[in-house]
């Protein structure tokens, strides 16, 4: 019941009139995401939770996702996602004059999911990762190590999970021969208002293999987000943001798919209790002396600088 690909390719249209087959008593398909409206008409995102009984509270913030829900029949994934993103990528200045006083060294456990909609480059494509972040409380400098992740395709009751899900309960890191982990550096700044933070990674070139060996290169990859500690259902930290890349190359021959201006992404924090679940066994952790040890033993790829030196803010 594990979705084998870390990047999931969705069908472009509903086929065989299979959409909309949920039973009447369910409000939505578990794990589906949809657009919602925040104060002032700003777009936000919400996730179908509770076995399909209700939508989560609307998660609001800069760069909220422009998505609608999808219906799923078995493992035929059918999307109605609008991946459009008009205009240039909203920039968060790395030298932003913001409050970096009294920042936490970590938000919750430090581990959170990342679900990125790359539909503007390749229709119906989603990239998922599980990241672990540590922050320098004095400067706001942050370091992340991100492990590629897959999707659990069935709920505990046997229902199909939509391929565009961002629900953290159905995201599992690939700590196996098709897994990889990379490091990113970021800046965290406290935003004015009620306990929100901006996060932006430094531009970085990424070269990874997915789908059993298919090469993907992202030039000047950057993640930006608004982080709201404890704002999600069950007190999860929420991340709502965008990914940008100057160029995307597919395959060893480097088929040029152009730039990614602003790909929406959602993230949710995990607590330490969840990290004890079997799906996180061997997860690379940023404060470990040998974060890649289990991944490499299982045949995965470690792109961290070795020997690894944990950030000074680690205990």
Image (cartoon, rainbow, N blue to C red):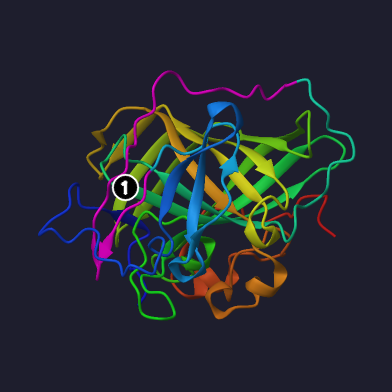
Mark 1 is surrounded, within 10 Å at the Cα level, by few (under 14), some (14 to 19) or many (20 or more) other residues, namely some
User: For the N terminus, which image quadrant?
Assistant: bottom left
Q: Residue at x 57, y 41 (%)?
A: 240
Q: Is residue 137 visible?
A: yes
Residue shown at 67% from the left, 57% from the top: 236
Q: Residue 78 colored magenta?
A: yes
Left/right of residue 301 with respect to residue 110 in the rendered view: left
**In terms of depth relative to the viewer, which is nearer, 32 or 290?**
32
Side of 217 where 138 appears, left or right: right
Residue receiving disc 1 = 125
Residue extending furthest toward the left: 16
Would you place residue 164 above or below residue 175 in this image? above
Q: Is residue 49 left or right of residue 5?
A: right
Task: Tell me residue 198's x, y (percent).
Answer: 68, 34
Quarter assignment of residue 248: top left
Question: What element does badge 1 sit on?
Answer: strand
Q: Quadrant of the C terminus?
A: bottom right
């Amino acid at each position: 019941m594990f979705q084998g690909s870390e990047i999931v390719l969705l069908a472009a249209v509903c086929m065989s009139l299979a959409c909309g087959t949920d039973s009447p008593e369910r409000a939505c398909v578990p794990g589906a995401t949809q657009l919602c409206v925040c104060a002032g008409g700003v777009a936000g995102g919400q996730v179908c939770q509770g076995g399909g009984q209700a939508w989560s509270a609307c998660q609001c913030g800069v760069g909220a996702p422009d998505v609608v829900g999808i219906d799923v029949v078995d493992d035929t994934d059918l999307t109605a996602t609008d991946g459009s993103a008009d205009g240039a990528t909203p920039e968060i200045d790395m030298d932003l004059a913001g409050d970096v006083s009294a920042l936490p060294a970590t938000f919750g456990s430090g581990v959170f999911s990342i679900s990125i909609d790359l539909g503007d480059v390749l229709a119906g494509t989603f990239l998922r990762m599980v990241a672990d972040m540590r922050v320098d409380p004095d400067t706001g400098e942050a370091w992340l190590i991100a492990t590629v992740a897959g999707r659990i395709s069935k709920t505990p009751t046997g229902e199909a999970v939509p391929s565009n899900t961002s629900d953290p309960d159905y995201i599992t890191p690939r700590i196996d021969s098709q897994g990889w982990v990379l490091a990113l550096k970021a800046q965290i700044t406290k935003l004015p208002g009620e306990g929100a933070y901006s996060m932006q990674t430094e531009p970085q070139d990424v070269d990874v293999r997915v789908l059993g060996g298919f090469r993907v290169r992202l030039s000047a990859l950057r993640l930006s987000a608004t982080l709201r500690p404890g704002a999600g259902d069950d007190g999860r930290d929420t991340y709502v943001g965008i990914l940008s890349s100057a160029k995307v190359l597919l395959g060893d021959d480097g088929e040029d798919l152009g730039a990614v201006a602003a790909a929406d992404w959602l993230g949710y924090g995990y607590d330490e209790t969840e990290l004890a679940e079997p799906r996180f066994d061997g997860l690379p952790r940023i404060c470990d002396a040998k974060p890649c040890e289990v991944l490499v033993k299982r045949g995965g790829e470690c792109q961290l600088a070795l020997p690894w030196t944990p950030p000074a803010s680690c205990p």
